[in-house]
Amino acid sequence: MTPLPKFSVIETDFDTVLDCDGQIVILMPGDAKLDAVARRINKATKGALGRFLGSKDFDDLALGKVLSLAYPTGLNAKSVAVAKINGNASVADARSCGVEIAKTAKCENILLAGGKFKRIADLVEGMAMRNYEYLDQKTNTKPKPLDVRVMVQELENQAAAIDLKMAVVDGVFFTRDLINAPANVLTTTTFAKQLSALSKLGITVEVLDEPALEKLGMRTLLCVGQGSDSPSKVVVMQWNGGGDGAPFAFVGKGVVFDTGGISLKPAAGMEDMTMDMGGAGVVAGAMKALALRKAKANVVGVVGLVENMPSGNAVRPGDVVKSMKGDTVEVINTDAEGRLVLADILWYTQERFAPTGMINLATLTGAIIVGLGHEMAGVFSNNDQLCKQFINSADAEGEGAWRMPLAPAYDKMLKSRIADMKNVGSRAAGSITAGQFLQRFVKQDMPWAHLDIAGVASIASESAFSPKGATGWGVRALNRMIADHYEPQEEATGE
């Protein structure tokens, strides 16, 4: 597990500032008005800070950006970093500034002079989200997590807010580690073991093996993994923080490696298919975040873990497989395997838990990348309210999501001559027909959304909150949606 950065909240103390031997970060508004800490630093540096603030360099510094003064005279610190941000900054501005502070950090030991800045927890969240690097497979390189002391005036409130943020960041890091891990490290078995370890947080975890899945009739899921030596599994995670009510459900595709099966993918880029378990990774991270912050809601996470390999026992194009629901599927393309996994676990989740709503996540189609690139996930839904809840939550967390259409007209593209349906249509509207396929395994009265995260789960360049590789997209949005819509809301009080 990539270690989390450490944030401790302390009282403002001038001796602490003068004695700091790491990096001091001060938050400076555009008008360059010095607070008490900045005045003390300016005095200690014999006016060097004031000269910088009065210079063209500070005037030209964009809001949210950072400049550092190295080895300032009069201080023990290695540098004083000035982050330019106004007191009325938005949540997004505060997070963005935190990202810049983390990216430009000169050392791991940081003293952050937060003063009266109201959005310090959001700024810290940005710092934490960007302070990530996957180094598990490197032999002589260790992660360098930040160790940040945050000086603020309202200690208890700010400490509680930061703790809440870090619980969710912990879930994000868990998701990133899972998605970044190579397929020989994160097998279906080791994945299930990592999820089972969540039980120590109060999550009830069950691992269903192949005999149990065969008994349940999960034939479409099992056919995907039948060509692999790695056993297929379904992992059920239950967080019961909301009493006796029915849970909300997260459902995730967990293809730990996807060769395409008999419909073999091209060799170029196949190494990236370690991320095809991204949907299950996000579900796992969201469940961990909910447990760590002790969410007052009932949520179940169900993930299907398989490996899609070609072999003498692999499912073939043209095979017909019966789903747990009872519908038959003609497998036209074995590389359209994620929907076969989801079909069974969507039906299982509804049959067993009768959830109040259900969201599935999957790195499902390359077509969604053609349509939305790497900025947005595709959202397909049968319920306007649920769709709006999620998209608003994603927007609030800075995670791009865009609604895509579902319509009966697309169903004709899935018609099969010999079975109830095909698992793919034509090249046209590929992400939509995938959504139409999944909708056939959603009961008519079940609020449901399908998130195609193929373009956002792992990317080749850095994102707003992460270095290149796994982003952890979706953990914060799902957590926010549960917090805002499925937990008791505190009533506003006033005179």
Image (cartoon, rainbow, N blue to C red):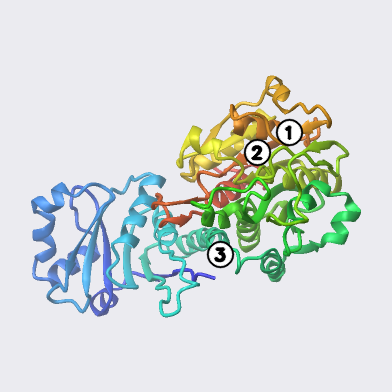
Residue in the picture at 47% in, 66% down: 134
Of labels 2 and 1, earlier in sequence is 1
Residue under numbered circle 2: 450
Upstream in the sequence, badge 1 or badge 3? 3
The mark closer to the camera, 3 or 2, is 3
> Which element carries disc 3, helix, strand or loop?
loop
Amino acid tagged 1 = Gln
Between the residue at mark 1 and the residue at mark 3, the CA separation in whole angstroms equals 31 Å
The location of residue 421, given as percent across then percent down, is 78, 31
Looking at the image, residue 212 sits to the left or right of residue 382; the answer is: right
**Crowdedness of circle 1 by 10 Å Cα count: few (<14), some, many (20+)?**
many
Position of residue 179 measured from the top left corner of the image (x, y, whole percent):
56, 59
Identify the residue at the far top of this view.
409
Tell me which residue sits at (45%, 40%) in the image: 375
Cα separation between marks 2 and 1: 9 Å
Secondary structure under tag 2 reads strand
Q: Could you tell me residue 54's position as x and y percent?
A: 9, 54
- Above or below 153: residue 286: above
Vertical relation: 81 (above or below) 428: below
User: Contact, CB < 8 Å: mark 2 with mark 1?
Assistant: yes
- Mark 3 — residue? 182
Q: Image point 19% across, 50% down: which residue?
A: 61
Q: Secondary structure at mark 1?
A: helix
Contact between marks 1 and 3 (CB within 8 A): the answer is: no
Which amino acid, by three-letter code, is at mark 2?
His
What is the spatial separation of the Cα atoms under label 3 and label 2, in whole angstroms?
Answer: 26 Å
Task: Report the amino acid beneath label 3.
Answer: Pro
Task: Determine crowd level at label 3: few under 14, some 14-19, many 20+ residues with C-alpha closer than 10 A.
Answer: some
Left or right: where 391 falls relative to 345: left
Q: Which residue is mark 1?
A: 439
Tell me the quarter of the picture where residue 384 sits.
top right
Q: How many marks?
A: 3
